[in-house]
Amino acid sequence: MYPDPKATGFKVKDLLKIAKVDIKDIAHTGGVFSIKVTVECNLDSENCKHQYDIKHVKTGEQSTPFPKVSATYYEENALQIDADSRDYQMLVGIKCLISVVGIGRIFTWSKMMIAVNYSERMK
């Protein structure tokens, strides 16, 4: 079964595989992923089921948070060079929007007796 039901972390290649996205599609522009984790636990047996829903959020070029471009200018008078220089950086990455929802259940005799007693009174 893929992914592992008890997985709590993923490699980027696994994230792309689950979302059915090829790295070539987001290599130059970056990408935004929606990750929804639903956890359902039976606390009596400490058994939890994880369900993952990972989607690539389709965004237009104007709304994507990447690429980020910045330039830093330097004066190189200390090296006796007349020309100014600059560093140009273009940053591309992956942004993850993570949502975790959990449901926990536990059986207690006291709550069951209160519910039965309450239902008897309502008759």
Image (cartoon, grey):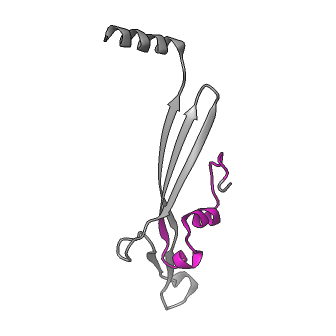
What residue is drawn where x is 50% and y is 72%?
Answer: 30
Of residues 15 and 104, the one drawn nearer to the viewer in this rendering: 104
Residue 98 position in % (x across, y down): 48, 52
Of residues 25 and 71, the one drawn nearer to the viewer in this rendering: 25
In reply to whether residue 29 is colored magenta, the answer given is yes
Segment tinted magenta in the rendering: 4-32
Q: Is residue 56 left or right of residue 119?
A: right
Residue 91 position in % (x across, y down): 51, 73
**Quadrant of the frame with the N terminus:** bottom right
The answer to which image quadrant residue 120 occupies is top left
What residue is drawn where x is 58% and y is 75%?
Answer: 23
59 w.r.t. 51: above or below: below
**Quadrant of the frame with the C terminus:** top left
53 w.r.t. 60: above or below: above
Q: How many marks?
A: 0
122 w.r.t. 21: above or below: above
Of residues 119 and 89, the one drawn nearer to the viewer in this rendering: 119
What residue is drawn where x is 64% and y is 60%?
Answer: 11
**Residue that lies at the very extreme toward the front in this rendered image:** 123
In reply to whether residue 12 is colored magenta, the answer given is yes
**Residue that lies at the very extreme toward the bottom in this rendered image:** 82
Residue 22 position in % (x across, y down): 58, 75
121 w.r.t. 85: above or below: above
Residue 31 position in % (x across, y down): 48, 69
Q: Is residue 7 left or right of residue 109?
A: right
What residue is drawn where x is 52% and y is 66%?
Answer: 94
